[in-house]
Image (tube, rainbow, N blue to C red):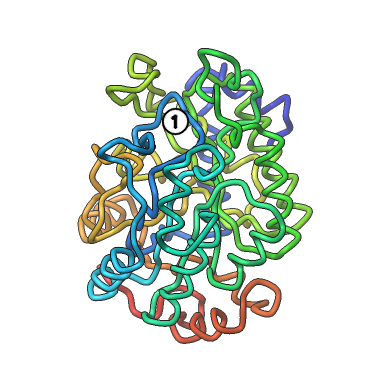
Amino acid sequence: MLTRSEAVELERLSQAEFEPLRRAAGALRDRYWARRATYSRKVFVPLTNMCRDRCGYCTFVQQPGTPNAWLMSPDEVMRTVRDGERLGCKEVLFSLGEKPEQRYAEARAALARFGHTSLIDYLAEVCGRVLDETSLLPHVNAGTLDDDEIRRLKSVSVSMGMMLESVSRRLLRPGQAHHACPDKVPAQRLRTLERVGRHGVPFTTGILIGIGETWAERVDSLLAIDAIHKEYGHIQEVIVQNFRAKPGTAMAGHPEPSLDDMVRTLVLARLLLHPSISVQAPPNLQERFRDYLGAGINDWGGISPLTIDFINPERAWPQIAELSRATEACGFRLEERLAVYPRFLGNPEHHFDKRIAGRLAMLARPDGLALQQCL
């Protein structure tokens, strides 16, 4: 495990000096996670792409009133979910813009057509329908949340998520990645991490690298996540996601992180975070499976056999069978997990609504991974 000062120095190490740390990260992963890489078979439901934030790298968000802005209807949601169910999916990943109704009349009008005044209330309704009408379990990426919103969503979801991205307040300044993004204020996001911890919610978070943060700020972002996890024990995974430049965004010409930068950050995450936290890297953003596994990751995240990655639509998911072969070629076994990690199943009364706990019992094998493995 690294101290903060050692972690800050890691960026400047030569390859020869870095190599022992890379091996240590791999050994730590092997000790706590074995020679196994997991993934979740999911269907991706982009409930709405309207958002009150304007991140400099995002193509998912569309301005209300434009032809490409949407709020999915309940019937559209359920058609997508049922198609995923037929393909063996077990997770419904709900992604959505943050609180568009607080900024745009068009978003309020769209919600009103479905009988709601807030996006969180509407999300809770469609999650409830997923539980009532299918065998799948919702995972919700709903952004910053207050206590009442967390309670409402916990009753209809198995887990939640929100990328911390960075603790750097500099990124809120004009010309930076998070300018004009009220929900990207680091203190707001850290408060959400703490609140979901108090409520016992299994939670996914992560950092987005290459958006203008310094290496030291990257270190501090991981340390902030780890400190909250040590208090509540609820962080199930940390995603290390590399920025990808997209045409038409304010950061279209911004340089992307190199493979070496990504590998060093993965090693940093594995050696800074508590070993119980899964470290994940998206396999569709840079297909260097051997390098990622060699840096200590143990999970590939949610992968869909049906829907695209709506956040990075230009980057197709790997076919699950191909990912399995690539993982095995690196000396690992690909295993399907559920949207919640096995260790949370040991205390269902704390982490889940009774209805969700009962469904998990039907979907999980004795070790907590998915009972019916699909490749």
- Height in image: 165 above or below 176? below
Q: Secondary structure at mark 1?
A: helix
* Picture coordinates of residue 35, whole percent (x, y): 44, 59
Asked whether residue 269 is in view, the answer is: yes
Q: Which residue is under mark 1?
A: 262
* Picture coordinates of residue 168, whole percent (x, y): 64, 25
Q: Quadrant of the N terminus?
A: top right
Which one is in front, 28 or 266?
Answer: 266
Which one is in front, 341 or 294?
Answer: 341
Q: Amino acid at mark 1?
A: Met
Q: Quadrant of the C terminus?
A: bottom left
Q: Quadrant of residue 225?
A: top right
Q: Residue at x 63, y 18 (%)?
A: 170
Q: Residue at x 64, y 37 (%)?
A: 222
| Number of numbered discs visible in the structure rendering | 1
* Picture coordinates of residue 30, whole percent (x, y): 51, 55
Asked whether residue 300 is in view, the answer is: no
Question: Quick one: label 1, few (<14), some, or many (20+) residues within 10 Å?
Answer: many
Q: Quadrant of residue 233?
A: bottom right
- Height in image: 114 above or below 17? below
* Picture coordinates of residue 201, whole percent (x, y): 64, 63
Q: Residue at x 39, y 19 (%)?
A: 251
Q: Is residue 88 left or right of residue 33?
A: left
Q: Quadrant of residue 243?
A: top left
Q: Is residue 183 left or right of residue 280?
A: right
Q: Residue at x 46, y 44 (%)?
A: 97
